[in-house]
Amino acid sequence: MRQLALSAHLPGATVRRIPVDGVELAVETLGHGPAVLLLHGFPHTRAIWRDVAPRLAAAGFRAIAPDLHGLGDSSPAVRGYEAPAIAADLLRLLDVLGAGEAHVVGIDLGVAPAFALAASSPERVTSLTLSEGLVGLLPGAEAFLGQGPPWWFGFHQAPGGLAEDVLESSAERYVHFFLSAGSRRGLPADLARLIVGAYRDRTSLSNAFDHYRAMPATAEWIGYWAQHQRLTTPTLAIGGGVVAEATARQLEPIAGRLTQHVLEDCGHITPIDQPDAFAELLIEHARAV
């Protein structure tokens, strides 16, 4: 672990490390009521929910924001980074927190494990919200992928630790690039420093890229699942300024109850660029079910 003591990044939240099947997940909780599990992406940490979680708590929900495996203050995965394995650990996290059911929210890299939670354990997922991330290789994202997958997918997935070898001396600049490109409004300076600090060393980069290296196996799992089953969980797709409608297009053939919305004046990091609108959509979606 990078530090012995944990600091809360969500205003008013309680933070702790929770052992789950050989992994220690750093998680912040805020509020009381129905659970809302918030899964961040790359290069993010649980801190990106700092403007959304208080709004959820004020509306009568319990926000649960973990660092994904190997990122932020959480330890690396021990059973691999494929979405079903990550989802299984997240279910155990909910168990420890006493949450029998949860509204599950995933953005960017968090979309796949959020989807896997609803696909494999629908009885535990009250509602599902996916934002600015692709659902494996399901049809519907052809317009987004017209020029091929984003260049960094292949770079991050390169075997032998190539990406972290290349970036070891310039991680700070690399993370700043993604944060600047991902936000139309720009991250507050203190939040940017916090996130950059979480990805400053080679180990944290390697853990992040392991999530990407698991994507082909996750996509294969999702493709097989989609051939035989459909989502029964009420699902909301929130697009931003990059992936936009592609997530909803992928979900349309397999989601029985799908609502979709594209945020205006928004970049890729939707809970940072439009926290009020994002939280309002989550609350409305959760209350509707």
Image (cartoon, grey):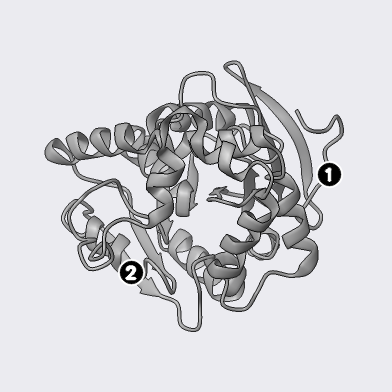
Q: Which residue is label 1 attached to?
A: 7
Instruction: Quarter of the image for the C terminus: give it.
Output: bottom left
Where is residue 194? Give x, y as percent. 76, 54
Q: Is 164 or 120 nearer to us in this picture?
A: 164
Q: Secondary structure at mark 2?
A: strand
Total of numbered circles in the picture? 2
Return the disc, 1 or 2, that comes first in the chain's sequence: 1
The quarter of the displayed image where residue 76 is located:
top right
Q: Residue at x 68, y 69 (%)?
A: 187
Q: Residue at x 39, y 75 (%)?
A: 262
- Examine the image and state in which quarter residue 237 appears: bottom left
Image height check: is 143 above or below 232? below
Element carrying mark 1: loop
Mark 2 — residue? Answer: 260
Dot 2 crowding, Cα within 10 Å, few <14, some 14–19, many 20+: some
Please state the horizontal and vertical placement of residue 137, each as a whole percent of the image: 24, 48
Q: Is residue 254 above or below residue 85?
A: below
Q: What is the C-alpha distance between the residues marked 1 and 2?
A: 35 Å
What residue appears at the point 69 percent right and 27 percent down from the top-left corner? Answer: 18
From the viewer's perspective, tell me whether residue 280 is left or right of residue 50. left
- Pointer 1 local density, CA inside 10 Å: few below 14, some 14–19, many at least 20: few
Marks 1/2 in contact by CB < 8 Å: the verdict is no
Q: Which residue lies most toward the right here?
A: 5
Q: Amino acid at mark 1?
A: Ser
